[in-house]
Image: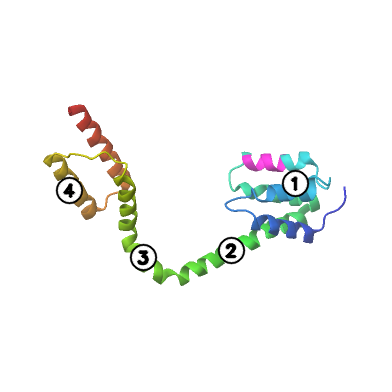
Amino acid sequence: MDAVSVVEIFSVMVLGALLSFGGGSGQIPVIQGRWVEPGLLAPELFSFALAITYLAPGPRAGFIAGIGYYLAGVPGVAAAMLGLIVPTCLGAGAVSFALGRMERIVALVQPSSGYVIGALIAAAAWGTAVPMRLARVEVAAVGLIAAVVGWRNPDPVWVVMGAIAVGSGWAWIA
């Protein structure tokens, strides 16, 4: 088996990290194309490293350390992990910086965003919904629930559970 340099391991892992969002899946085709298909890494070792990662708790990109080890020992592990970590940290820093710059705009938009989303949902439902004929008690109940939710700001789980209970009870009565 030909030796793979730590610089190559680092470079390939940087490329894989740039193709990944939320895990190590972007590295899989890059590693296969660069080292498995040409015969620099045995398919069995690649599969073993990937399988162990899926069996172990933690991030799915953990197989990168195994690939680095199989290719160049402990220095390969360091190169592979740095190749994964460096672009991820730089990307996270760039996103954090950009969001910090947009904080003033987000603060202006945030209070009205719920109303905009509600209006969009209402507009979408307007043409498809069956007209409802609510009794006065139902309108009063909706108003009361809206007041309680606005006043107490309960956990949404309790609101949904309460709606299920009230809806089930109302359906059983009617």
State the image quarter where residue 44 is shown.
top right
Side (left or right) of 12 relative to 143:
right
For label 2, the residue is 91
The alpha-carbon separation of the residues under discs 3 and 1 comes to 45 Å
Identify the mark nearer the N-term, 3 or 2. 2
The alpha-carbon separation of the residues under discs 4 and 3 comes to 26 Å
The alpha-carbon separation of the residues under discs 2 and 1 comes to 25 Å
State the image coordinates of residue 173 (x, y, percent, origin top left).
Answer: 17, 28
Magenta residue span: 48-54
State the image coordinates of residue 128 (x, y, percent, origin top left).
Answer: 32, 41
Identify the mark nearer the N-term, 2 or 4. 2
Amino acid carrying label 3: it is Val
Instruction: Please give the label number shown on residue 5.
Output: none
For label 4, the residue is 143
Identify the mark nearer the N-term, 4 or 1. 1
Numbered disc 2: secondary structure: helix
- Bin the neighbour count of mark 4 within 10 Å (Cα to Cα): few under 14, some 14-19, many 20 and up: few
Instruction: Please give the label number shown on residue 109.
Output: 3
- Bin the neighbour count of mark 3 within 10 Å (Cα to Cα): few under 14, some 14-19, many 20 and up: few
Amino acid carrying label 2: it is Gly
Identify the mark nearer the N-term, 4 or 3. 3
Side (left or right) of 40 relative to 66:
right
The alpha-carbon separation of the residues under discs 4 and 1 comes to 60 Å
For label 1, the residue is 32
